[in-house]
Amino acid sequence: MAKRMCSAVWAGFLRCKTAKPTFSNIRLMSSESDQPNIIHPMMEIPPIPPYPEKLNEPVEERRARLLYQSRKRGMSENGLLLSTFASKYLNGFDERQLKMYDHLINQPDNDWDIYYWITGVEPTPPEYENEIMDLLKEHTKNDNREERLRQPDLP
């Protein structure tokens, strides 16, 4: 993957918009001045290990896991979008669709990528372009202007 260009200060780091951050392209802001401290370029953030596919997982157990994972994303934006999506559509998915949704929310190593894809800010990579992504993009548009201020209650 190509190196990212960093564009905006976010939580003390420069948030990288189009590539994975490494210590060679992240600047920490010094607490004593407005001058950034450059971290040694040979140090890199270790990669996130690949997500192991759950083989022979019962369908109802998979639905329950995906519902939980849709709610606990680590960023509020995706938590709201994915939890409302899962609450609305997950029970109607067949095994093939559940597998696509599992792949979509667990394979990318950056939740911001998922957010940018479903909101249309960045193009969706071909491996994630499928009927579930299309449905999620439509859900995100919220054409019916549904109120989504909090995650839906659990069943």
Image (tube, rainbow, N blue to C red):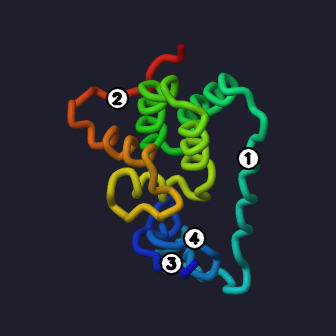
Check disc 4 and report the residue beneath it.
20
- Lower sequence index among marks 4 and 3: 3
As drawn, is 105 to the left or to the right of 41? left
Q: Which label's residue is closer to the chain start, 2 or 1?
A: 1
Q: Earlier in the sequence, mark 1 or mark 4?
A: 4
Please determine whether, in this image, residue 133 is positioned above or below residue 49. above
Q: From the viewer's perspective, is the residue at label 1 or at label 4 nearer?
A: 1
Amino acid type, residue under disc 4 in the picture: Lys
Please rate how many residues cluster around mark 2, counting C-alpha atoms within 10 Å: few if below 14, some from 14 to 19, many from 20.
few
| SS state under label 1 | loop
Asked whether the beta carbons under mark 4 and mark 2 sit within 8 Å of each other, the answer is no
Disc 1 and disc 4: Cα gap in Å? 23 Å
Q: What is the CA distance from the residue labelled 1 to the residue labelled 3?
A: 28 Å
The x and y percentages for residue 59 are 67, 27
Q: Disc 4 versus disc 2: distance between alpha carbons?
A: 30 Å
Residue ID for mark 2: 149
